[in-house]
Image (cartoon, rainbow, N blue to C red):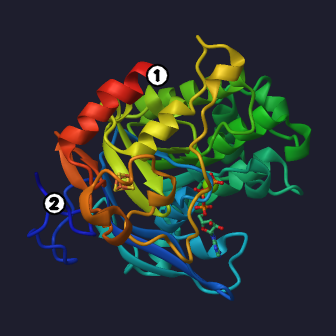
Amino acid sequence: MTELSKSGAAVGEPTSASRPPSAFLEVRDLKVHFPTDDGLVKSVDGLSFQLEKGKTLGIVGESGSGKSVTSLGIMGLHTAGQYGKRKAQISGEIWLDGTELLSADPDHVRKLRGRQMAMIFQDPLSALHPYYTIGQQIVEAYRIHHDVDKKTARRRAVEMLDRVGIPQPDKRVDSYPHEFSGGMRQRAMIAMSLVNNPELLIADEPTTALDVTVQAQILDLIRDLQKEFGSAVIIITHDLGVVAELADDLLVMYGGRCVERGPADKVFYEPRHPYTWGLLGSMPRLDREQQERLIPVKGSPPSLINVPSGCAFNPRCPYADIPKDNVTRTVRPELTEVGSKHWAACHMTREQRERIWAEEIAPKL
Ligand SMILES: Nc1ncnc2c1ncn2[C@@H]1O[C@H](COP(=O)(O)OP(=O)(O)OP(=O)(O)O)[C@@H](O)[C@H]1O
Ligand code: SF4
Ligand SMILES: [Mg+2]
């Protein structure tokens, strides 16, 4: 069993910035902390993962687990958040196509944003300007990176609106955001994000506010566009069901840290962390009666200022007493390999977890 250091590298491997990245996107030991009057909020606290072009990573976790802060950090927008009055503290390494973004010139990162990496935001209204037409905004996004006249850029905007399934795109290009329905706004934002064919697309809860049919259409759209452009995609969601089929890899976040990650089918069908079991248990099931569908993970998400000592999940974990000597409440578990490219952070032995999964959890799902 290999043990991972905080950076996610196997213990003994060098973790310095001199080690070249081995993937298109490589995040190492990312920390994003916010100083507040109540104390330091450790929204992201040592997150590491890799993503190749053409692949999709699903990041899953409850509200407040640090998913949006992670994506904003990658985009270099962590200071632009809704609470962003004081400067966020960010550390670690974010390698995108061979460039380390945290130490790069902010002007360079600004140029990469939009062109090489783009984000679909959780709330399309906050990302679209109310006073400009959808077309003007897409034209603007395109012309920042392409030296073309307005007419050419407008043609491109209409083409993109068409690609994302907006009816009568040559007319709707002149609509204002408030004239679009929620699903159409989400599509318009996807069109704007993709106008420059970004190599990395981060979609933060792209479907939360939408009804089930539109959700499925938006996810299909992201999948089609990814195939066409060969981009690397990160889909962020609190709903494992949304990404189970779409993602190649899954990363489960709890309290600003990764508690499990690996190939999507492994994390989905052979999960090895009690929190992932809880998430699976709370997934809506179409083949069950309404009242049987949702078994939420009991208790509340941890404080990110006073994170519980030991395993942050221990106050909510039904198995916290299984590991010996109260280790669960005193020692923070590191990610350890539980299968090929599959990692989980839990003090229970692999055998204990395999048994609980097979005998107690899987039969109930
Ligand atoms: N600028 C800030 N200052 C202080 N705390 C912040 C700031 N930005 C985010 N946070 C806190 O960081 C934590 C993680 O926030 P984040 O938005 O990443 O959660 P999330 O996983 O995206 O949740 P959701 O599913 O609700 O979108 C939250 O507790 C949030 O209150
Ligand atoms: S380390 Fe302990 S508390 Fe944490 S998930 Fe494993 S059994 Fe539960
Ligand atoms: Mg969020």
Find residue 276 and report its horizontal and vertical position in percent. 43, 41
Ligand 1 sits in quadrant = bottom right
Q: Residues within 10 Å of mark 2 (few under 14, many from 20)?
A: some
Find residue 307 and report its horizontal and vertical position in percent. 50, 72
Q: Is residue 22 visible?
A: yes
Q: Secondary structure at mark 1?
A: helix
Left or right: where 281 falls relative to 91: right
Q: Which mark is residue 364?
A: 1
**Of all residues shown, which one is farthest toward the top?**
287
Left or right: where 40 falls relative to 338: right
Q: Secondary structure at mark 2?
A: loop
Between the residue at mark 2 and the residue at mark 1, the CA separation in whole angstroms equals 31 Å
Q: Which quadrant of the figure has residue 352?
A: top left
- Residue at the (39%, 47%) spot, across then down: 319
Amino acid type, label 2: Glu
Name the residue that disc number 2 marks: 3
Find residue 138 and report its horizontal and vertical position in percent. 70, 49
Q: Which quadrant of the figure has residue 304?
A: bottom right
N-terminal of the pair, mark 2 or mark 1, is 2
- Who is closer to the viewer here, 202 or 28? 28
